[in-house]
Image: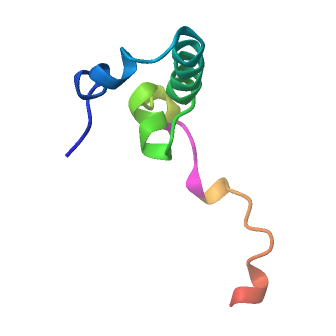
């Protein structure tokens, strides 16, 4: 079950001003920092152009360093 702001409001409304300001700063800091890679992509999804390989020749990629694996 996910908590919502409405679930927390009864407790938040009882905080003294200093603690309310502290909580607001903590919450804003948390909101500004994605917690996971998935959340990062949700906030700014990959654009179609990012993976546009039009005109790229995959055989032209640098193959150096693979000799030892054969």
Q: Main secondary structure of the magenta part?
A: loop
Residue 64, given in percent of the width and then of the height, sits at: 80, 69
Q: How is the image coloured?
A: rainbow
- In this view, the residue in front, 27 or 65, is 27
Q: How many marks?
A: 0
Q: Residue at x 78, y 87 (%)?
A: 68
Say if residue 55 shows up in the picture: yes
Q: Which residues are magenta?
A: 51-58
For the C terminus, the quadrant is bottom right
- In this view, the residue in front, 47 or 39, is 39
- In this view, the residue in front, 5 or 64, is 5
Q: Residue at x 77, y 83 (%)?
A: 67
* Left or right: 30 in relation to 8: right
Point out the residue furthest to the top here.
17
Q: Vertically, is 29 above or below 66?
A: above
Q: Vertically, is 39 above or below 10?
A: below
Q: Residue at x 57, y 42 (%)?
A: 56
Residue 18, given in percent of the width and then of the height, sits at: 60, 13
Q: Vertically, is 19 above or below 60?
A: above
Q: Vertically, is 16 above or below 52?
A: above
Residue 11, given in percent of the width and then of the height, sits at: 34, 25
* Left or right: 9 in relation to 47: left
Point out the residue furthest to the bottom here.
70
* Left or right: 66 in relation to 39: right
Task: Check if residue 24 falls in the magenta segment.
Answer: no
Q: Which quarter of the figure has residue 14?
A: top left
Residue 1, given in percent of the width and then of the height, sits at: 19, 46
Say if residue 54 shows up in the picture: no
């Amino acid at each position: 079950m996910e908590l919502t702001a409405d679930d927390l409001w009864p407790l938040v409304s009882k905080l003294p001003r200093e603690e309310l300001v502290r909580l607001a700063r903590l919450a804003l800091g948390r909101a500004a920092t994605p917690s996971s890679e998935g959340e990062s992509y949700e906030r700014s999804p990959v654009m179609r152009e990012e993976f546009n390989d039009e005109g790229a020749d995959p055989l032209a990629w640098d193959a150096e360093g693979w000799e030892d694996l054969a």
